[in-house]
Image (spheres, rainbow, N blue to C red):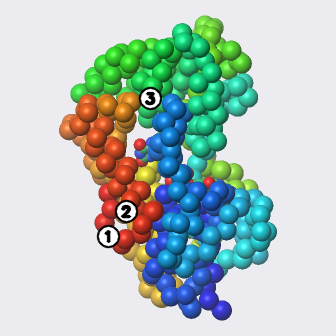
Amino acid sequence: MSHRLVVIGAGYAGLLAAKRLARKLSRSDATVTLVNASDRFVERVRLHQVAAGQPLAAPSLRQQLSGTSVRLVVGRVTAIDTARRTVCTDAAPGALGYDTLVYAVGSQARFDDVPGAAEHADAVADLEQATRLRHRVAEIASGGTVAVVGGGLTGLETAAELAASHPGLRVRLFTGADDVGCGLAPRARTHLRRALDRLDVSVHPGTVIATVREDGLDTRDGTSFAADAVVWTTGFRAPELARAAGFATDESGRMLVDATLRSISHPEVYAIGDAAAGVSAGGAPSRMSCQTALPMGRGVAEVIAARLAGREPAPVRIPYAFTNISLGRRDGIVQFTHADDRPRRFVLTGRAAAAFKEAVIRSTVRSGPRRESGSDESDS
Ligand SMILES: Cc1cc2nc3c(=O)[nH]c(=O)nc-3n(C[C@H](O)[C@H](O)[C@H](O)COP(=O)(O)OP(=O)(O)OC[C@H]3O[C@@H](n4cnc5c(N)ncnc54)[C@H](O)[C@@H]3O)c2cc1C
């Protein structure tokens, strides 16, 4: 019987891994099945644009997989039975046996334990949330307020995009940190502050949110702010699936993997992308980003193919080179980084940075998950 490879999740990491596995292994040796919750490839890096009212092209996965031997199952995996080596799906076929499993389920919004956040706040972590937020924002009358909670990259991009697309709205950005852009080089940070100023985004540093209400939020120091929409961007966590199945995971639910992306608790299982807790080329913990997902997607296929051929694979390298932040469609920051993700002094700002980011995103999708070319691709 041929080896049964099952990949859960057709995002940047899983789609690339499935295609590359199918290309590297002959059909008689292995079957590759890709299970995804929807029949579309969603460019998550554009979801703040969706929230701001811009259209999103979500290409069909069947089209992306045409010409490959990958079998697509559209359905949500509800459980992994590691003893029986089976994944359970909420759609036909209901259960899928595997010999090797690749876990690539991405991440989701982390609503923390702040009372009211899960009930009243919106998010941009998946397409449904971003679409809901777009509708909510579209209904706010001019002069209304959107409160974005979280000063990380997603919060910054979301606040800037909403402010640029809806100049009639007041956008407030709340962060518990002392400032925005703390991980950036000084020039990038200065540019960020000026850009938020120009877009009229009011920044509230050092502000911890205690409660989210239907009509606003309360801070830990007792101040209340009215808001017509609250957007929660305090971070991402991996789905509960791995932890519930008994895999070794970190506190964010990411599967703990070794240098070949293999689960440290279940050697027949690999994890990639946001759902994996890996280590970068410079020794830093992997960051949830396309710059991690793509090398992991490519790398896991090399590792599995090597092991199936009886060879010991090389560790998978995750090289970090830059972080890019969009500030609306015409402004941005590219912060170049060392391999361990520490910022270099060199930064690109303004229109050039916005154009750089757009080019990177397009090339990521064109040459990464959409068309597995086997060449060296650039990452976002
Ligand atoms: C608004 C926003 C902006 C971002 N901007 C950037 C950026 O500029 N640069 C950057 O590098 N990163 C950015 N990111 C992060 C980036 O999108 C993620 O790191 C990346 O998508 C991770 O890829 P992945 O393949 O691991 O997961 P995903 O792209 O999330 O794909 C996971 C897939 O698994 C599927 N899935 C999940 N659970 C199940 C299940 N139980 N059963 C079946 N299928 C399932 C999902 O439907 C999805 O198709 C941004 C994220 C957001 C939300």
Query: Of label 3 and label 1, which has the lower sequence position?
Result: 3
Dot 1 or dot 2, earlier in sequence? 2
The residue carrying mark 3 is 161
Mark 2 lies on residue: 367
As measured in the structure, the alpha-carbon distance from the residue carrying label 3 to the one carrying label 2 is: 26 Å
User: Which one is nearer the viewer's eye here, 100 or 134?
Assistant: 134
On the image, the x and y values in percent for residue 81 come to 75, 68
Q: Residue furthest left?
A: 346
Residue 182 vs residue 205: left or right?
left
Q: Which residue is mark 1?
A: 375
Q: Residues within 10 Å of mark 2 (few under 14, many from 20)?
A: some
Of callouts 3 and 2, which one flags the residue occurring earlier in the amino acid sequence? 3
Q: In front of the other: label 1 or label 2?
A: 2
- Disc 3 residue type? Glu
Per the image, label 1 sits on a secondary structure element best described as: loop
Q: Is residue 74 above or below residue 292?
A: below
Separation (CA) of disc 3 from disc 1: 33 Å
Q: Are marks 1 and 2 in contact (CB under 8 Å)?
A: yes
Relative horizontal placement of residue 345, taking residue 180 as reference (left or right): left
**Disc 1: CA contacts within 10 A as few (<14), some (14-19) or many (>=20):** few
Taking the spot 23% from the left edge, 27% from the top edge, the residue there is: 187
* Residue located 66% across and 92% down the image: 1
Q: Nearer the viewer, residue 262 or 139?
A: 139
Horizontal placement of 202 versus 148: left or right?
left
Residue 281 occupies which quadrant of the picture?
Answer: bottom left
Residue type indicated by callout 2: Ser
Between the C-alphas of marks 1 and 2, the distance is 8 Å
The disc labelled 1 sits on which kind of residue?
Answer: Ser
Residue pictured at 28% horizontal, 25% vertical: 191
Q: Which mark is drawn over residue 273? A: none
